[in-house]
Amino acid sequence: MDWTRAGARSEFAGRDIPDKESVQRRSAFSILAPDRQRIMSSFIGDREGIPGPVHDGPLLVMPEPQKPKRTSLWLRRLWLVVFVLFCLEVGIVLTVLPWTRIWTENSLLLGHRQVQEFLQQYFVRGLVSGLGLIDIWMGIAEAIRYREGPEV
């Protein structure tokens, strides 16, 4: 039996053995549908003008990325500026406030002596200052991470 000839029959499965040309025409992502013996693919342009059966099954169609509208782009920029300024302001206040007289001489806590003593502890002051540093870090990281791209 000549195995190099196109359309030669196999003795084992009774299926056609494809020749080299038909194997090269198919994309690496194409396979034969087992029930219809047609090329199925997840890419639209992988057949490259080869005449034959139409694709059976789902096709992956991805629209081209659209440019963001000018107003949405400026809204994103404005939101970034407001967010970064807010994070920096709150972070600076939380970092500095526990170490000032406003923290120690708080008139709201005059009737609550135990709460006032608790807030005077250095670990509480350090904890609040640490939250302030984290808040500053969040604002700066968001400003650095900002990218204007088509994925809007």
Image: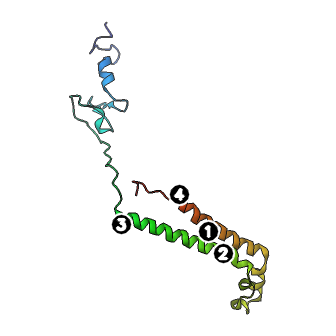
The numbered mark, 4 or 3, whose residue comes first in the sequence reads 3
Give the SS element for disc 3.
helix
In three-dimensional space, the C-alpha distance between marks 4 and 1, rounded to whole angstroms, equals 15 Å
Residue 68 is drawn in which quadrant?
Answer: bottom left
Q: Are marks 1 and 2 in contact (CB under 8 Å)?
A: yes
Disc 1, SS: helix
Which amino acid lies under the numbered mark 1 shown in the image of this protein? Asp
Reply above or below: 129 against 50.
below
- Name, please, the residue furthest toward the top: 1
Q: Position of residue 91 (x, y in %)?
A: 63, 72
Residue 135's mark? 1
Whether the residues at callouts 3 and 1 have beta carbons within 8 Å, the answer is no
Identify the disc placed on residue 2: none
Disc 2 or 3, which lies upstream in sequence? 3
Give the mark nearest the N terminus, 4 or 1.
Answer: 1
Q: Mark 3 belongs to which amino acid?
A: Thr
Residue that numbered label 4 is attached to: 145
Q: Quadrant of the N terminus?
A: top left
Give the labeled residue for mark 2: 94
Q: Quadrant of the C terminus?
A: bottom left
Left of 84 or right of it: where is 62?
left
Residue 139 location in percent, x, y? 57, 66
- Whichever of labels 2 and 4 marks the residue nearer the N terminus, that label is 2
151 to 33, vertically: above or below = below
> Is tag 3's residue or tag 1's residue first in the polypeptide sequence?
3
Dot 1 alpha-carbon crowd within 10 angstroms: few under 14, some 14 to 19, many 20 or more = many
Which residue is under mark 3?
71
Q: Nearer the viewer, mark 3 or mark 1?
A: 3
Above or below for 95 versus 150: below
Residue 148 image position (x, y, % from top left): 44, 57
